[in-house]
Image (cartoon, grey):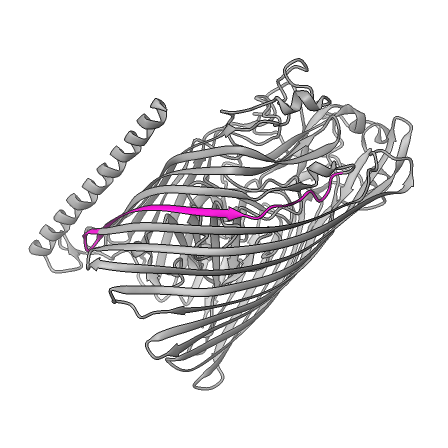
Amino acid sequence: MLKSHIRFRTAAAIAGLAVGMACSTTALAQDADNRAAAGQRDGRRVQSIGEIVVTAQKREQKLQDVPVSITAVTGEKMEDLKVTDLRSIQSYVPNMAVLNSGVNPVVFIRGFGSGPNNVAFDQEVSVYLDGIYGGRGAQFSAPFFDLERMEVLRGPQGALFGRNTAAGAISLISARPGSRLEGYLSAGYDFERDGFDLTGVVSAPLSESFGIRVAGKMTRQDGYIRNDFNGRKEPLLRDEMARVTLRYNPSNDIDVTFKNEYGRHLLKGGVTVSGSLTENIYDNDFGSRRYVSDNYAGAGLEEHSGIKTWNSALNGDFGIGDHVLTVVGGYSHFKTMRFTAYDEYSAEGVVPPAAANAKFANGFPEKFDQWSVEARIASPLRQFFEYVAGVYYDHSDYKLHQDTYYRDIGTLAGHQSTDFHQKGDSWSAFGQGTLNFTPTFRLIAGLRYSRTKKSADFTQYTVSGSALNVIGPDRSGKLNEHYLDPSGTLQYDLTPAVKIYATIARGSKSGGFTSNTYNVAADGFQFAEERSTNYEAGVKSRIADGLATINLSIFRMDFDNLQQSAYDPDRRTFFTRNAAKARSEGAELEVQFIPTGGLSLNANAAYLKARFIDYPGAPCLAYETVAQCDSANPASLAAHNVAGLPLQFAPKWSGNLGFQHEADLGGMKLTTGGNAQFRSKYFIADGYSPIWGLQKGWTKFDARIALSSPDDRWTIALVGRNLTDVHTRGAAIRFPASITGTARSINWMDEYRSVSINGTYRF
């Protein structure tokens, strides 16, 4: 308690310091106004930081006016940084991590996220595409091109965004047709991956009230880990994406947009590399080689992970007097194809005989369909009482098939399968109101009532050969849950440019079922919902006549019944259960500054302490003896508690530091920029091994140099990511000798260095 009090006082002192800095700098800006005309500084013409408009509170607002810990990135910036998926953006967002797990990326915010072991998990951080809810990591694999912006909201967003945003939400907004003919063509070649990408966008008005936007992208690239079996670098990337958007805007009172989007994402090969269980894996050359044959475990299948997606969205805004009615309807579909093989090298990097090690492989194909509709009404602004209120419904149908292939495990060889089928329905009613007591002081209160129904069936069987896993009885289950997610925020404007806020918010994530565990026990098939509570205070400031912004938030997030899934390698099975309590607390600081014309600086820093407060029945840890915890003894497991253990994928320190500079070259513009991202050490594996389950801290460097016309009509850019080629691991598990021949760790490697040249022409 004393340590928590000291941490809170320290964070509060930091907040006070930031407010003081903001107010002092505002005073300096006022002095500057007295000394020179607006836009002048020391006799030099300077620019100001552009305002980003966001919709985090279901209204268009300036980013600096929203009392939420939020990071917004424009679509143009994502193009410049070569952001192609969620993993590409994590280094630029404080307290955000994305686990590299093939076609199902898992997002962690402030230490909380749904792990990859239970494939059917709803995510704690949901992704929204043009207002359409996506609770699964695979749902929106195609949208990362031709975006207007991306918003990352940290902390529970239950009141306005809905269920399964217990840790946060990510909102993607695709570009819409405009009132004039415009577009661009872009092509790039990656020297490290020996491949190219092509993007084309055309937006045109078809009449005064009707417009169309067509966008497409193709990528063909090799990978970054050499497979010594076939001599190629893996995984090979094959992507195609296409989007058609129609917009009908006959007046200020009617604005309707309809979008269809198709995506195909395929990785040939994988990113797993064998490692030692007894030696620290800190050599930067680790991960340069792997060995995976094309007939793994006798399945006759090549290692791959792929997904096809189809997303449709209808967004309509209708003026009704001085109110606005918004209707959002959507259909989301995906189908995955995944065969997971594992590096056959021993921990010492020796190729074993094929019969000794290529013993085990899995396939996890999925199929998912979702229909949703939302309607909400928004009052006019600049009133004493402003409000947004609405209703929401979605229906989903999810199927998961699991194949397990094995050979030469003792005397066993064969093929086993499971099937999981889940249907779900969710209803909710929500509202948020703002009481403007004075022009500078307001109370924002929100409430959402949700009801979720799910039903699931699970079957398991031996397809051929002898049984490796015990086949238990089929399972089925139903759940019917109710949630009430309130939130309250007090916001006060110290000055027109400096605002402080304090928030209390609840979030929820629905319960569910274990989807891919053989012989799952009756009491282990279903798990309960989890709840989160966030306490947050912050300051947002736009200071020095728009030359700088300083945003700071301090927070504490408490989770009850936190859903946890872990892998037990000795029993080759997964555990999914509810941890009693977990907590994360820390601070997030974001700074932008323009010290002189043409130069902009940015820095993000985050401190995080995320840990279990109470977790009885936790799986055994890698360094514990059988006397301390016996995974084969139910009584021993029930008494096992890991209170105080840190959460996975939650570094204590993270952030980035970057710059961008523009220079006039006499008829052309030269833009240079660089960014350094850092993370302190963090755990990446169930069992919390301090040897193979711990990723040491790292720093990675990105850079960009571009030559363009003054109006940016054409641009040629050289872009480098992870220039020092730092090798880091996204996740790890322990493989027992019983199924691999050599007991070792299997490590999922993050992307290595990338250097590409890109050309863009806009019209």
Image quarter hosting the N terminus: top left
Residue ID at (45%, 51%): 485
Name which quarter of the figure residue 445 lies in. bottom left
Residue ID at (57%, 53%): 135
Q: Is residue 358 left or right of residue 661?
A: right
Give residue 628's position: percent from left, percent from top: 63, 15
Residue ID at (81%, 33%): 358
| Relative to 81, residue 516 above or below | above
| Relative to 121, residue 640 above or below | above
> Is 426 in the magenta?
no
Q: Is residue 190 left or right of residue 364?
A: left
Which of 143/761 is in front? 143
Which of 549/709 is in front? 549
Q: Is residue 420 left or right of residue 79?
A: right
Q: Which residues are magenta?
A: 493-517
Residue at far left of view = 34
Which of 151/195 is in front? 151
| Relative to 328, residue 676 above or below | above
Q: Is residue 589 left or right of residue 312?
A: left
Q: Is residue 729 visible?
A: no
Image quarter hosting the C terminus: bottom left
Give residue 91's position: percent from left, percent from top: 46, 43
Give residue 616's position: percent from left, percent from top: 58, 27
Give residue 475's position: percent from left, percent from top: 76, 44
Name which quarter of the figure residue 285 lies in. top right
Which of 381/278 is in front? 381
> Is 507 in the magenta?
yes
> What number of labels is visible?
0
Residue ID at (34%, 79%): 321
Q: Principal SS element in the magenta part?
A: strand
| Relative to 205, residue 64 above or below | above
Q: Is residue 724 visible?
A: yes
